[in-house]
Structure formats: C-alpha cells, structure tokens
C-alpha cells in the first residue's frame, strides 16, 4: 500500500514498554507503506532520516527505539530538534500495557526481558523508570493490555493510514464501562452514570446503545442533550488550541457502569455531532460485548 506523498515529510518513532507490542506495531506500520528501522540508537536518528532523503523525496519512515543498551533521552530530544530544523516532523508512538499483562506475555513466550534483570517484574520496574520522560514526550499513547493484534492493527491504521501531518486533528470517542476498568490512554474522560440506566428497563436491558430504542431512551432523559451540548462545545473550543500546540490526536472517553447502554449512546451522538462540524471523529465501544 503506497502512501500519498505530502509536502511535509514526517517520521514516526515507535517506542514503549517491552512486551507491549512494539514489534507488532512496527509490522502494521510497515504494511501501511512506511520504511521501518528497528533498534536504532537515538544518536543515529538524524543520520538515518537523512540517508533516506525524506526531506527531498517525502518518504515515510518509522524508527523503533527501545531500552536495549539504555535510552539517552537528551540525545533523542536533540535529534528531534535537529530534524525539525530540517523540516522533518516527528511523532512519538508509545505502547504500554499493565504490568501483569506484560509478565503473562513473557511467561507465555518464554523469552528473557531485554534488560536482563533477575526477574521480569524487576525488569518492568527498571524499564518504566527509564521511559518516564519518553512517555511524557509521546504524541500517541496506546495501552495494549486489552487489545489483540487485530484491534491494534485497526487502531494504528485509523491513526496512520494515508497520514498527513498537516491534516486536522483526529478525535477518537471511546465508550467504556467503569466496572471493567478506566482506560489509561484517554486525554479526556467523562462519566455519564448520572443518567438513568436502561439496564433497569426490561425491554432495553439486553439491547445496546447502538440500538435506536436505547439511544432514544438515553438521549431523551433529562440532562442528556445538555451534557452532549456542553462536551461538544468544549471540544470545539479545545481542538484548535491543541492543534496550535502540535497535537494531532485526541482521545475522549465516555464511561458508564457496564459500557453497554449510556456511554455507547452518548459516544455515538457526540461522534455524529463532531463529524457534522468537520471534525474527524471515530467512535469505538470498548466494552459493548463484555
């Protein structure tokens, strides 16, 4: 799949916790038409980009940077600044997962952790400490704890297929259920448990917020329309200001108890409104089938 060339070349830096899916993410990005270089020291970042002639030929390049051999964050910052001077935009993708999930993945694969600590748990702790600054620098944070490879591919494709860094911000509106845990990778989170719960309406209990009867019930309750109005207006206020600071992706979480009814209906309505306002919004429902 060839990506359309743009006047503003860019580089993706794929990093994050070992066991969180960096290698899988790199394969997906490669399928999207990026040239991918794995395990690149930050000191060679600018050199690698220049050797691919990105500023002249507008190619897309993804570099996988991990904690093997240490991670000199200051070198990485300097390299990013140097690329910016040459007109190359960079975006950092940070992949993470909960500690117990990473432990389980290593136990299942029976592979040693690259940091070589006595235990996987101690290696995870050491790596988290090492990556604190890089996580704070990241433009995209993806928690893969509850994602399979197909869901990770879908999320990365939504973000980076036909990627043009000059395009308007992408907004992800995601419903979820608090009883399944709050998502760690959202920028803004809203709780809609103040709305009446369709679960207690027998004819609606087994249906979902994507079904018209449930949607009509939720959106017709007192305060629902006003709530969506307020969130919509706030996002329309924030989006251009985030864009002015270079942010190209915004994740919005809408939560209810189980993630079946209220959050789903509100997320769908918010997504529709944003798209009508020419905001590129994608709606997903994390717990709709849980």
Image: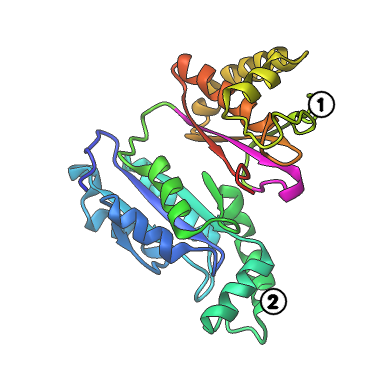
Front tag of 1 and 2: 1
Residue 25 in the image: state x and y as whole percent.
42, 58
Task: Where is residue 2? Give x, y as percent.
Answer: 20, 46
In the picture shown, does residue 200 fall above or below 134?
Answer: above
The circle on residue 173 is none
Residue farthest bottom in this picture: 118
At horizontal 52% and vertical 70% (from top left) the residue drawn is 67
Q: Is residue 182 highlighted in magenta?
A: yes
- 174 sits left or right of 27 in the view: right
Observer-nearest of 172 and 192:
192
6 within the magenta span: no
Mark 1, residue position: 194
Task: Determine whether 61 is above or below 8 in the image.
Answer: below
Instruction: Say which element carries label 2.
Output: helix
x then y, percent, for residue 246: 48, 33
Residue at image position (49%, 63%) is: 21
Q: Position of residue 140 (x, y in %)?
A: 52, 45
Q: Quadrant of residue 204?
A: top right
- The range drawn in magenta is 169-184
Q: Quadrant of residue 36?
A: bottom left
């Amino acid at each position: 799949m060839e990506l359309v060339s743009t006047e503003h070349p860019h580089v993706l830096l794929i990093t994050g916790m070992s066991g969180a899916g960096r290698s899988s993410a790199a394969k997906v990005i490669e399928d999207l038409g990026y040239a991918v270089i794995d395990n690149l020291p930050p000191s060679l970042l600018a050199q690698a980009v220049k050797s691919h002639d990105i500023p002249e030929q507008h190619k897309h390049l993804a570099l996988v940077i991990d904690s093997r051999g240490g991670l000199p964050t200051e070198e990485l910052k300097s390299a990013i600044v140097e690329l910016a001077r040459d007109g190359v935009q960079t975006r950092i993708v940070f992949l993470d997962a909960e500690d117990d999930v990473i432990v389980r993945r290593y136990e299942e694969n029976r592979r040693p952790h690259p940091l070589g600590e006595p235990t996987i748990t101690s290696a995870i702790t050491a790596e988290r400490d090492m990556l604190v600054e890089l996580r704070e620098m990241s433009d995209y944070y993806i928690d893969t704890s509850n994602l399979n490879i197909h869901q990770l591919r879908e999320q990365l494709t939504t973000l980076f297929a036909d990627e043009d860094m000059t395009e308007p911000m992408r907004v992800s509106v995601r419903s979820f259920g608090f009883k399944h845990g709050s998502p760690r990778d959202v920028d803004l989170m809203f709780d809609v448990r103040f709305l009446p719960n369709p679960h207690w309406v027998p004819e609606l209990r087994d249906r979902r917020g994507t079904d018209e009867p449930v949607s009509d019930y939720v959106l017709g309750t007192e305060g629902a329309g006003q709530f969506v109005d307020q969130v919509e207006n706030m996002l329309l206020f924030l989006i251009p200001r985030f864009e002015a600071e270079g942010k190209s992706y915004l994740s919005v979480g809408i939560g209810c108890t189980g993630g079946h009814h209220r959050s789903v209906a509100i997320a769908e309505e918010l997504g529709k409104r944003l798209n009508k306002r020419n905001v590129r919004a994608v709606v997903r429902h994390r717990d709709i089938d849980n």
